Image (spheres, rainbow, N blue to C red):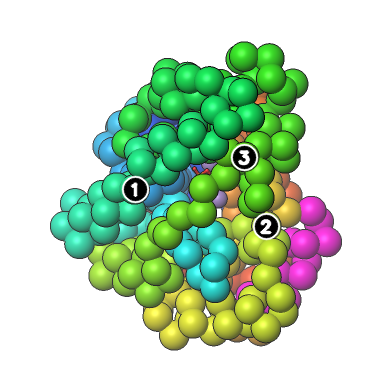
């Protein structure tokens, strides 16, 4: 392990495998990360830690330092927010039960999404999406998007989201995920650190965003993603200021899902601004 845990580290602490909505296995992601120069890696599947032992073993075989990870779906002020957890004990029973509960509503939601799509003439979407889901418990909008691309209804997954899978579109079903408090507490009680994922992606008013950061901190959250595949350079700058304002550490991650769909590959982001405290400086004793 590198002894310098400063901002100039090629850490990639956000990506997805077939255990959620990525298209690569943990065993294929690890060498891809290594080849791209990643010096500290975490696999953060949505609402699921079933890939952690595989990712850790694959990282170990490459002598690539690893942190356990997940990305929990949360409902806050009527919007979906993602909270990344890093460096937790992945055998902690509160965390595993909480994640199982969070995954719980996905099948019913997927069936309702399929019913909505059937009303606009797209049939068999549930079965079609399920074929793309490596983990049926984690059937997600991404799998529906892949099915609609395969069926030539749309050219790419962004078009599917725009036309069918976002608010007020035929395949969108509002859903209640975990609460912010629950997600932060599951992570921190398992000795991990909670991180607000890609804050620029949410459509909050300034007041709602302020409430998100304030409540997150009050529940024990300690970090925010600043440099991510979901942020522009200007957004990274903006959330660097937010991190300083709220006294939060900063994280960095590509949010890589697939070579065909993701524009940011593993390990290919700019470094964190050097004025920030990197989240890995708080996690030195959790790196495996
Ligand atoms: P779900 O958890 O089922 O609501 O699915 C959310 C996932 O859909 C996210 O984690 C992204 O991988 C993907 N996603 C969300 N919005 C978009 C978009 N506009 N374009 C492509 N993928 C998206
Ligand atoms: Mn995803
Ligand atoms: Mn996310
Ligand atoms: Mn993600």
Tag 3 secondary structure: loop
Foreground label between 1 and 3: 3
Q: Earlier in the sequence, mark 1 or mark 3?
A: 1
Tag 1 secondary structure: loop
Residue 57 to residue 148: above or below: below
Other-residue count near label 3 (Cα within 10 Å), few / some / many at <14 / 14–19 / ≥20: some
Extreme-right residue of the structure? 234
Tag 2 secondary structure: helix
Which is nearer the eye, 122 or 13?
122
- Does the magenta-highlighted stretch encompass residue 241? yes
The residue under the point 54% across, 37% down is 116
Residue position marked by numbered label 1 in the rendering: 105
Q: Is residue 255 left or right of residue 215?
A: right
Residue position marked by numbered label 3 in the rendering: 170
Residue 57 in the image, given as x and y percentages of width and height: 30, 32
Ligand 3 near label 2 (Cβ, under 8 Å)? yes
Residue 120 in the image, given as x and y percentages of width and height: 63, 29
């Amino acid at each position: 392990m590198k002894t310098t845990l400063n901002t100039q580290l090629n850490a990639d602490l956000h990506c997805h495998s077939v255990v959620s909505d990525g298209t690569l296995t943990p065993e294929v992601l690890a060498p891809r990360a290594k080849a791209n120069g990643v010096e500290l890696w975490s696999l953060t599947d949505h609402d699921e830690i079933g890939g952690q032992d595989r990712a850790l073993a694959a990282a170990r075989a490459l002598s690539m330092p690893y942190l356990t990870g997940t990305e929990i779906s949360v409902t806050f002020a009527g919007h979906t927010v993602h909270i990344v957890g890093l460096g937790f004990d992945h055998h902690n029973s509160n965390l595993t039960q909480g994640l199982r509960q969070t995954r719980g509503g996905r099948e019913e939601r997927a069936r309702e999404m399929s019913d909505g799509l059937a009303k606009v003439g797209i049939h068999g979407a549930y079965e079609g999406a399920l074929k793309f889901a490596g983990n049926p418990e984690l059937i997600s909008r991404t799998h529906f998007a892949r099915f609609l691309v395969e069926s030539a209804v749309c050219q790419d997954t962004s078009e599917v989201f725009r036309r069918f899978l976002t608010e007020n579109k035929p395949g969108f079903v509002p859903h209640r995920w975990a609460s912010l408090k629950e997600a932060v507490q599951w992570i921190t009680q398992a000795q991990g650190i909670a991180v607000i994922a890609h804050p620029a992606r949410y459509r909050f008013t300034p007041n709602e965003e302020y409430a998100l950061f304030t409540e997150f901190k009050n529940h024990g959250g300690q970090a925010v993603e600043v440099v991510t595949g979901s942020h522009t350079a200007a957004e990274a700058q903006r959330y660097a200021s937010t991190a300083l304002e709220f006294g939060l550490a900063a994280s960095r991650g590509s949010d890589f899902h697939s070579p065909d769909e993701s524009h940011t590959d593993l390990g290919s982001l700019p470094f964190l601004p050097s004025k920030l405290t990197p989240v890995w400086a708080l996690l030195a004793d959790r790196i495996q």
